[in-house]
Image (cartoon, rainbow, N blue to C red):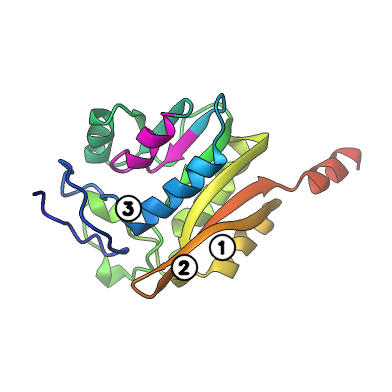
Amino acid sequence: MEPKFNNRKNATEAIPAPWHPQVYQPEADTMLLLEAAMHEVQPGETVLEIGTGSGYIARHVSAITRCYATDINPHACRTARTQGVEVIRTDLASGICRRFDVVLFNPPYLPTSEGERMDDWLEYALDGGEDGRDAIRRFAGILSGIIAPFGRALLLISECTGIDEVRDIFGRQGFLTFIVAQTITEGERLVVLRIMHDLCRMSAGMRA
């Protein structure tokens, strides 16, 4: 039986698999995002998962359609490849010059002070900065360049990150957000946001 690594986000039953201890293993947030993705993704669409970690989500989505993945963690990239995932080692989607129908992201969302930071690869999956929204802000800034005009992003966030604050970040970038899945695990509310271009605003901008 594989040991259960507590990665501090949330906990679920251990999944027997050869996860590297510096790779975020599938937890309750992983399962919620996977469930939302399996409802969202359609055959023939192109999908990108940012921060794939173990590759658990990308592997399942690949049973429906072509799914690419990225991660900055070299141990995560190696682990995902053992799952048959097409993964590129990069920061978010840096260097990727195409648009996708669906983008998936379970970001590091734990509010983390300077004194709480650990100098290891696993921290990339956990450390969301002082307010838990550092990686989310960066993602919002690049999203328009990686999703198709009618594309969607699914973003997993926690109430500890500030759900309304996260929605406001994307609203200021010209996106609409909808809660499409949620659960409570160990007293923590997790939600999945569907994020889409505000097509009315885009049309108005083109006419102006």
| Disc 1: which residue | 166
Q: Are marks 2 and 3 in contact (CB under 8 Å)?
A: no
Quarter of the image that includes the C terminus = top right
Relative horizontal placement of residue 1, taking residue 208 as reference (left or right): left
Residue 166 picture quarter: bottom right
Q: Amino acid at mark 3?
A: Ala
In percent of width and height, residue 41 lies at 54, 36
| Disc 3: which residue | 125
Q: Nearer the viewer, residue 86 or 118?
A: 86
Residue 117 picture quarter: bottom left
Under circle 3, the secondary element is: helix
Residue 204 picture quarter: top right
Q: Are marks 1 and 2 in contact (CB under 8 Å)?
A: yes
Graded by Cα atoms within 10 Å as few (under 14), some (14 to 19) or many (20 or more), the crowding at tag 2 reads many
Under circle 1, the secondary element is: helix
In percent of width and height, residue 171 lies at 68, 58
Measure how far apart labels 2 and 3 are at the Cα level: 14 Å
| Disc 2: which residue | 161
Relative horizontal placement of residue 193, taking residue 58 as reference (left or right): right
